[in-house]
Image (cartoon, grey):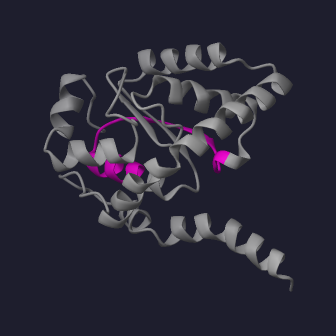
């Protein structure tokens, strides 16, 4: 095998392996829980470090959104309208990538909380998005306080949580003991 084929195989396998082996996947197994799980410290540290790559990801997101949005006929305004509609219809909304360990961990935290939420999966990963997913990613970045284009993005009561609105913000709410208070204040119901 060539070095290139090995590197490509590793690039494709890494998110999938991280997803399957993530402690969050174990916690997603059906079980009754009475308390929100503590966020994985390794995923939390990696999430905090993603800020270093933000300028690259923001520029890439805008280019990807412009090109794929033009091809598919979807604008950032269309995506913004979709986000607003979802936030009006659902008290808690999370935008994710299927293979992202950050998204997987955030979903595990939400699952363990027992609260209702809607997961909107934009695609497998940022580099595999179509026009609507790419424009939604740009719209979400525009809504984030710090402009980060990374996912997940979590909305509680129609408002994006924290600076980047992602896993770090969700983990901070849980760690600070403010998660359940935020969900209750927004009127998010517990699952039956």
Q: Residue at x 21, y 47 (%)?
A: 174
56 and 165: which one is in front?
56
Q: As drawn, is 100 to the left or to the right of 39?
A: right
Does the magenta portion include 107? Answer: yes
Picture layout, residue 56 above or below residue 7: above
Q: Can residue 30 be seen in this view?
A: no
User: Which of the two residues, 169 or 63, is positioned nearer the viewer here?
Assistant: 63
Q: In this view, does 162 lie to the left or right of 131?
A: left
Image quadrant of residue 77?
Answer: top right
Q: Which residue is drawn at 85% across and 26% down?
A: 71
Q: Which of 78 and 143 is in front in this view?
A: 143
In the rendered image, residue 7, in percent from the top left (x then y), is placed at: 74, 74
Residue 132 percent coordinates (x, y): 70, 28
| Residue 158 image point, x, y percent | 37, 20
Q: In this view, does 175 lie to the left or right of 153?
A: left
Q: Whole-percent x and y of residue 14?
A: 61, 69
Q: Residue 75: name its quadrant.
A: top right
Q: Does the magenta stretch include residue 9?
A: no
Residue depicted at x 22% and y 51%: 36
The image quadrant where one finds the N terminus is bottom right
* Residue closest to the far bottom: 1
Magenta stretch in the rendered image: 106-126
């Amino acid at each position: 095998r060539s070095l290139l084929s090995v590197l490509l195989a590793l690039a494709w396998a890494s998110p999938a392996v991280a997803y399957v082996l993530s402690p969050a996947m174990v916690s997603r197994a059906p079980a009754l829980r009475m308390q929100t799980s503590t966020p994985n410290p390794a995923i939390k540290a990696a999430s905090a470090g993603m800020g270093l790559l933000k300028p690259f990801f923001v520029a890439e997101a805008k280019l990807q959104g412009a090109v794929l949005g033009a091809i598919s006929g979807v604008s950032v305004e269309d995506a913004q309208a979709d986000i607003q509609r979802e936030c009006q219809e659902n008290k808690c909304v999370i935008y994710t990538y299927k293979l992202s360990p950050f998204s997987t961990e955030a979903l595990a935290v939400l699952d363990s909380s027992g609260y209702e939420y809607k997961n909107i999966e934009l695609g497998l990963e940022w580099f595999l998005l179509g026009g609507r997913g790419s424009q939604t990613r740009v719209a979400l970045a525009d809504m984030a306080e710090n402009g980060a284009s990374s996912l997940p993005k979590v909305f509680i009561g129609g408002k994006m949580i924290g600076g980047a609105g992602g896993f770090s913000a969700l983990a901070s709410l849980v760690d600070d003991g403010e998660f359940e208070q935020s969900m209750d204040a927004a009127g998010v119901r517990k699952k039956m």
